[in-house]
Amino acid sequence: MLGPVLAGLLGTIAPAFGYLPAANMREWTVAPFVGLFRWDGFPHAVMLSVTTGFLATSLSLLITVLIIGGWHGTQAFNLIRRLLSPLLSVPHAAAAFGIAFLITPSGWVARAFSPWLTGWERPPDVLIVQDHWGLAMVVGLVAKEVPFLLLMSLAALGQVNAKSSATIAAALGYGRVTGWLKTVFPRVYAQIRLPVYVVLAYSMSTVDVAIVLGPNTPPTLSVQIVKWMSDPDLAMRLEAAAAAVVQLLLVIGSLILWRGGEILVGILGTKWVMRGTRSFGDNALRIVGLGAGVLVCTGVLLGLVSLGVWSVAGLWSYPDVLPDSLFARSWSRHWGNIFDTGITTLLIALCATFIAVLLTLGCLEAEYRFNFTMSERGVFLLYLPLMVPQTAFLPGLQTLMLSTGLKGGFVPVVLAHLVFVLPYVFLSLSDPFRAWDVRFGTIAAALGRSANGVLWRVRLPMLLAPVLTAVAVGFAASVGQYLPTLLVGGGRLSTLTTEAVALAAGGDRRAIGVYGLAQTVAAILPFAAALLLPQIIWRNRRGLSDA
Amino acid sequence: MSHELHLDIIRISKDGRELIAIDQTVAAGEVLSVMGPSGAGKSTLLNYIIGTLPSNFKATGAVLLNGANLCVLPSNQRQVGILFQDDLLFPHMSVGQNLAFGLSEIFGGPIGSRALIRHLPRLA
């Protein structure tokens, strides 16, 4: 894990200081940085990265906390749990497009309220999507990050014995949310700290969501980096590298700042706990939490639906809520390309996920046989590719692969995807794998099975559902990747995601609807399989069919 | 060669405190009962005989089955079975497959459920 990231970083830092042998530039200078600072959009791009990152992360964390604190243990919560996996599997780009379709002045929300409430006969000339301050981008980021943080928190809750603490707090007279915040949240946060850092780093450095929902001139720093990298003038690559270094420093600085914030909140929180306030506007907070949660869910789901409607829409004038006619011509027009790029997408995902699952199983089984567990440092290294901005090390990785003779193409892209798929597969599979009752292994061994026999004939079959879920998670992660395919593929490989994001610049909503939906289906199908297959295979096995 | 299980001066301790001290012989056809309150170390003794003693325990002494020292063998070669307190049937296998899992050694290879059911009366 460390290898590719370090190699990539080195490959980016060197050009930042003027060293790019491929373009015959071999002097070490700081000229690229000077050029970067002279760019007009630089201060705004930096500010955008920082503010959108902090805003999106804080909002997501706040909503997550309010949802769990206010509703843990209730029926509503179980419903949320079931929705989480499907919501998470929607790729970032598709979710961003869906939300864009909802909130633009000519989007569904505006149409639903026009003209009877707003009096608009034509869409108002208000820049909501791609607004200057990146607020639409924050909305798009929060919509995907709340499910992610919720999922991580739920896993942490299981290990933290939340129920007893909540009961004790209630018995002492604490309101639901306040009690949870004071007794359980600090322990949960300790476990979700790394995912929160991932969210912060991603929010600051995302490219695909920024292209769809973020401002255009000037764009966020990451988008500008990609623009410079694709510039025919090779000298621009140096500026791109310099900007990538700045991006990396910004992320590191923000992580440190957030850590400082954690300590501050810890100090203030302890004082608050000592004061013993029983209730802190609990009922209002519960409603806000539920409202926000519902908003996030419906936002993503409605966004997907609007993608679907646009993909089959005939004539659809403003302010009608539904199109005048439906036809399938958009689908038939794009079907050929969707089929080809879809096959490519699925093949890449299949290979990357397969390798990732093999590596994960190997590591986890080794833990079991040689009696050790992964250290905290190991977990940190696992998360590392998710925390370092992709723009900061992918170009370097591409250069490295080129120099070892791997030209742009299938294998490098699969390897690049592997770097980002492996952490998610490991996170998804490690808890169920370790939670397996080892007495089954003891019995199997006592009956004469070798260690390999135990793994293949007992452990893995019993873990079919978690393994399939991990495969689905890996698949979704690979399908949603944008930069790795774009940069490492050398422009030769198109996936559903690269095609979809490329359409963002144009205004063809029907095409966007078609590609966005296709991308989502590619990511969701494995989850459906992960849910259905165990039910089918274990239909005659009482012990596993209700898993 | 005598047919017996000999627990030869077994001493198991944890954190410097001795948990189990046992020196017994169990002849073929006999039953040895080990009784004690929770935490006394009964399961630990069974773990030691099976070969799955956790690494934070220290143990000395040998387990001799028909004269052979089991302690140098891995769990799957000791020819010692274990029955836990919870029923730990393999949930992904049918009843027939569960039985076949343990019996296939006797038949020299994998056997189907039907063949197994035919042979069952002979094994009783």
Image (cartoon, rainbow, N blue to C red):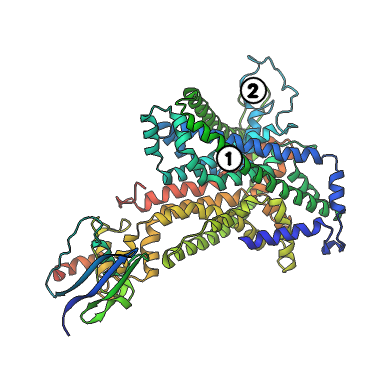
Q: Quadrant of the N terminus of chain B?
A: bottom left
Find numbered disc 2 in the image and state the secondary structure of the residue it sits on. Answer: helix
Which disc, if any, is residue A145? 1
Q: Residue furthest left?
A: B29
Q: Is residue B34 above or below residue B1?
A: above
Q: Quadrant of the C terminus of chain B?
A: bottom left
- Residue visible at 75% across and 67% down in the picture: A403
Residue A432 appears left or right of A206: left
Residue A192 appears left or right of B85: right
Mark 2 or 1 closer to N-term? Answer: 2
* Kind of residue at disc 1: Glu
On the image, the x and y values in percent for residue A158 come to: 42, 44
Residue A450 appears left or right of A112: left
Find numbered disc 1 in the image and state the secondary structure of the residue it sits on. Answer: helix
Residue A14 seen anywhere in this rendered image of the structure: yes
Q: Are marks 2 and 1 on the same chain?
A: yes
* Kind of residue at disc 2: Arg
On the image, the x and y values in percent for residue A254 come to: 67, 44
